Amino acid sequence: MSDTEKRDEPTTTAAEPPATEAPEAEPGLEELKRQLAEKTQEAQECHEKLLRYAAELENMKKRAERERAELVQYANEAVFRELLPVLDNLERALENGRQFEAPPGLMEGLELVRQEFLKVLQKFGVAPVESVGQPFDPAYHHAVMEEEAPELADQTVTKELQRGYLFRTRLLRPAMVVVARSGNKPASSSIDISA
C-alpha cells in the first residue's frame, strides 16, 4: 500500500468516542448531579451545625461573663455573713450597758464603734432589713413567735429579736421576728413558725 492510499483511507482517531458510548455519558451526568445534591445537603448540614456551635459558644461566653461578674460582685458575701454576729454582740453590749447603767464614756465609745461598723458595712452594700411594723414576709423574716396584738393587723411584725441584713440585692440573714396574731382569728390559721 502506498502512502497516498493510506492517506485516502478514513482514519479513526482515538479521541472520538464510539457511537455506543454516548448513552452511557448521560447516566454519568445524573450520577454527578446526585452526588452534587448529596454534598450540597451535607455542606448545608455542616453549616447549620457550625452556626449552632457558634451560638452555643457565644451563649457560653455570655453565661461565663455573667457568672464572673456575679462572683466579683458578691465575693465578700461570706465575710459579711461572718461579721454579722460581731455586730450583734456589739449591739447586745450596748443594750446591757443601758440596762445596767454602764459609765457614759464606755457607752459613748461602744456606740461610736457600732456606728463606724455600720458605715463600713453600708459602704460595701450591706443594709439592715426593716422589720418592726412591717407585714410579715417569709423572704426577709423568720418568725420565731406569735403574740396576741388585737390593735395591730394580723401577721404584722411586732418585735425584732435579731436584725436581718441584705447584701446588695441578696439576703445575708433573715430577721428573727415576733409576729402579731389578731384575737379574732383562730390560732390554727396563724403562720407556720417552724419555717
Image (cartoon, rainbow, N blue to C red):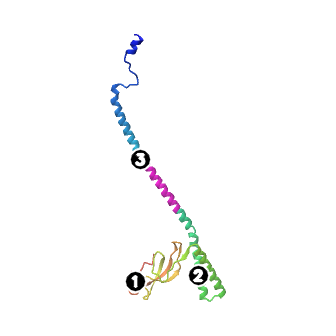
Q: Mark 2 points at which residue?
A: 91
Task: Find residue 151 and report its horizontal and vertical position in percent.
Answer: 43, 89
Secondary structure under tag 1 reads helix
Q: Give the range drawn in magenta.
A: 47-66
Q: In this view, does 68 lie above or below 187?
A: above
Residue at 52% over, 60% down: 64
Secondary structure under tag 2 reads helix
Task: Find residue 1 and report its horizontal and vertical position in percent.
Answer: 40, 10
Calculate the distance from the C-alpha at mark 1 to the C-alpha at mark 2.
34 Å
Secondary structure under tag 3 reads helix
| Circle nearer the N terminus (1, 2) | 2
Instruction: Identify which amino acid the numbered label 3 is placed on.
Output: Gln
Q: Name the residue under label 3.
A: 44
Task: Find residue 88 and report its horizontal and vertical position in percent.
Answer: 57, 79
From the image, state whether disc 2 or disc 3 is nearer to you: 3
Residue at 58% over, 70% down: 79
From the image, state whether disc 1 or disc 2 is nearer to you: 2
The chief SS type of the magenta part is helix
| Circle nearer the N terminus (2, 3) | 3
48 drawn magenta: yes
Residues under numbered marks 1 and 2 in contact, where contact means CB atoms less than 8 Å apart = no
The front one of 2 and 170 is: 2
